[in-house]
Image: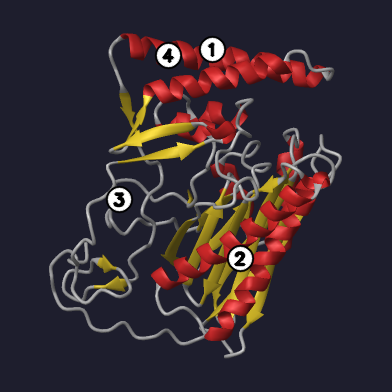
Amino acid sequence: MCGMAVAGPLPLHDGIHVSGGRRVRVDAESISLESLHSLVVASMAWWQQQLHHTDALTRQNAAEAIQQLSQILASLSQQLAQGRDVVKITTRLPQVRRYPQHCARCGAGNREEARFCRVCGAALAPAPRRRPNAVQVSIAACTDVGQQRSVNQDVAQAEHLTTLHGDRLTLLIVADGMGGGQAGDTASTLAAGTVRAELLVALTQGLPPTDAAWHVMLRTLVQTANTHVHRMAQTDPRYAGMGTTLTMAVLVDQRLHLAHVGDSRAYLCNQAGIADELQPHPAHPPPQIVQLTEDHSLVARLVDIGQLTPEAARTHPQRNIIYRVLGRQAQIEVDTQSHALSYGDLVLLCSDGLPIHVEDHQLAELVLTTQPLANRCQACIAAANAQGGSDNIGVALAQLNATGTA
């Protein structure tokens, strides 16, 4: 894209680490059917143990999980019998507004630091630094225990921050804790508090100058939070095994920077639609809501390889099995990304208690209204609770408006 020399050859293979020390092999954008088959077999064995649980609801969930996993296992076994070794991994996430610098000759978008257009090769004028505080950001956040849980382990935060250098930014955080007793609550609260505190310390050196620098900083923040949660889980028996998801968004002027671990989500919404700059002339109207993050969960991977439909994944009994979470291991891989924002854009962060009950198009209808953002937060929670509220629900919103608008 940019013409720079590649530092070295890409690794020939990688892997997906999952709970229990297992690893699913990924090779050249494909996933090993044999590894996936073994993972499903292990999952079935775990659910078979749950059939002997004293709780009736747990036994019912186990029976449903075994039934659905049996169908997946039959499909995988058939493909292995036919001689297939791997399946291709597909991505469902578009490249959304990643190219803020436009070429005067052809109009194509380019990355922020580009010197030449990636499409026509024309020289690009240095992008002028945006005037600080040229936009107004409205924010809101709320959580709810839901209809079936007794403890709220979700954290949702939205706040405006001012650095020592006078730069203004907006911070959104959603964390979904897990663990018995108060362990999940402790994990999510500790993780959210750590990344906020570490962010303030890091910004005393000034704002990172590039997207890449932002990504390095955000990964460091989340790794520090992971270290704190992991250390507490290892040293205090009350918190053994605790963990938490974490999705954080930093909005600076008209730029969005994200860091993400787990199955909490970040969405980008706009009443006028979310355009993909790689496809400047879409055949159909652009969607009003786009999921920016990728769920680090088993069912998300099964959707990617065609073993589950997105509709089935929303209610799958194993949707809570996530292979990447803060606190379970000493080191954690953190997804980061950056996007250009337009006036009217709304950033939505939420825990999985919202999307398991409310589909994406319904989320767009709930948040793209003229109501105050606090009311839209409550509308999301009410919708999830009306559909069963099977989990805690955390929501954080931020919307960009031109200066002087409501």
- Residue under the point 78% across and 53% down: 186
Secondary structure under tag 2 reads: strand
Under tag 1, what secondary structure?
helix
Mark 4 neighbour class, 10 Å CA radius: few under 14, some 14 to 19, many 20 or more: some
How far apart in space, not on screen, are marks 3 and 4 (Cα)? 35 Å
**Badge 4 element:** helix
Identity of the residue drawn at 25% across and 73% down: 114
Cα–Cα gap, marks 1 and 4 = 9 Å
Q: Earlier in the sequence, mark 2 or mark 1?
A: 1
Label 3: few (<14), some or many (≥20) within 10 Å?
few
Q: Nearer the viewer's eye, disc 3 or disc 4?
A: 4
The Cα atoms of the two marked residues, 1 and 3, are separated by 40 Å
Q: Nearer the viewer, mark 1 or mark 3?
A: 1
Kindly identify which residue carries mark 2: 398
Q: Do the residues bearing badges 2 and 3 touch, measured as CB atoms within 8 Å? A: no
On residue 75, the disc is: 4
> Which label sits on residue 70?
1
Query: Residue drawn at (48%, 25%), measured in percent from left and top?
Result: 308
Tag 4: amino acid: Ser
Rounded to the nearest whole Å, what is the CA distance between mark 2 and mark 1?
42 Å
Quadrant in the picture for residue 21: top right
